[in-house]
Image (cartoon, rainbow, N blue to C red):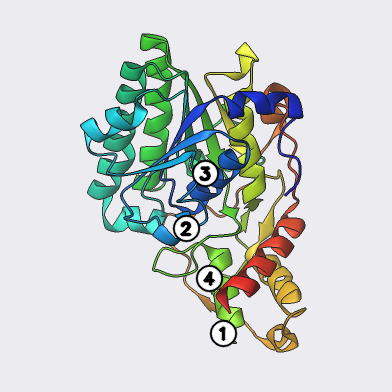
Amino acid sequence: MKNLIDKNKTATLATSKILVTGGAGFIGSNLCKTLLDFNAEVVCLDNFSTGKRHNLKRFEDHPNFRLIEADIRDEEACKKACENIDYVLHQAALGSVPRSIKDPQLTNEVNVGGFLNMLVAAKDTGVKRFIYAASSSTYGDSSDLPKIEDNIGKPLSPYAVTKYVNELYADVFQRTYGLESIGLRYFNVFGRHQDPNGAYAAVIPKFVKKLMNHESPIINGDGSFSRDFTYIDNVIQMNLLAITTDNPKAVNQVYNVACGGRTDLNELLDILQSELAKFDPEISKISAEYGAARQGDVPHSQASIEKAKELLGYRPDFSVKEGLTEAVSWYWNNLK
């Protein structure tokens, strides 16, 4: 892992108590591990509906780690989890556009109702700053590229609606109650501990698992859809910067979290095959299968990261290619 933040900012982490909701998930567990490495006290709140207990095995006995098994839809559990907390990293949510189309009510209950519970709990317990996972899906039907934070379109899925509502609520809580917040619009995050299994698994671990099993990956559409794929360590860096920033202009803002580039699905598959072929040359011979495009999918997504660079000092540590090299190595060593 590269140097995620300046050394003079690490003291803030070492003296802080930080709540990570959804801490057993892909992003949440990586955040927990990094924060513990910086000697922070970490409380993880998770109901394990999508998070995995094995993601916590690495540090469940760590003296600075505590697990609260509860649901963010439980108001009292949220308040209990926020007691004596300095910073909240709110990662808990029901992700996936297809899942939200299948069950919009459940997605709303968790992503909006649960989010509001956490905001109220943070306000009532005196949390210093509420940092939350926003989403690039908020850009909706806007065709502008690159995506700039202030220019959004209409949401294309129930999931996108919920993530936009989160931003509106966070803004209102700052204006009304003075609760500091920072929203991080994640763009297609990938990396270690991302689950390749299940109906709503992300594209990169799904492709990797298929290729490792010598099966044809299934591409939705013709493979021309493109995304700003972003390695997990870039996301961790942004969360740490959001915690430690002392720039008053940087707070109560929403930021893109990405690399600032664009990779289409055909290019992605080529890179993954090339990296996996270093371990198994036969993988380079596998061809993809093409299916129908998914409902609610945005054709192209690319972030402007200028705002994050200017106000937070963000500098992505990993390019897409570097991140894919790291991710493939991790999957090869952990899925075989």
Q: Residue 269 carries which label?
A: none
Asked whether the viewer can see residue 81, the reply is yes
Q: Give the foreground label among 1 and 3.
A: 3
The amino acid type, in three-letter code, at marker 2 is: Lys
Q: Residues within 10 Å of mark 1 (few under 14, many from 20)?
A: few
- The Cα–Cα distance between marks 2 and 4, rounded to whole angstroms, is 23 Å
Q: Residue 206 carries which label?
A: 4
The amino acid type, in three-letter code, at marker 4 is: Lys
Camera-side residue: 274 or 50? 50
The amino acid type, in three-letter code, at marker 3 is: Cys
| Residue shown at 36% from the left, 49% from the top | 94
Q: Mark 3 points at which residue?
A: 32
Q: Which mark is residue 213?
A: 1
Q: Which of marks 2 and 3 is nearer the N terminus?
A: 3
* In this view, 238 is above or below 84: below
Camera-side residue: 311 or 159? 311
Element class at badge 2: loop
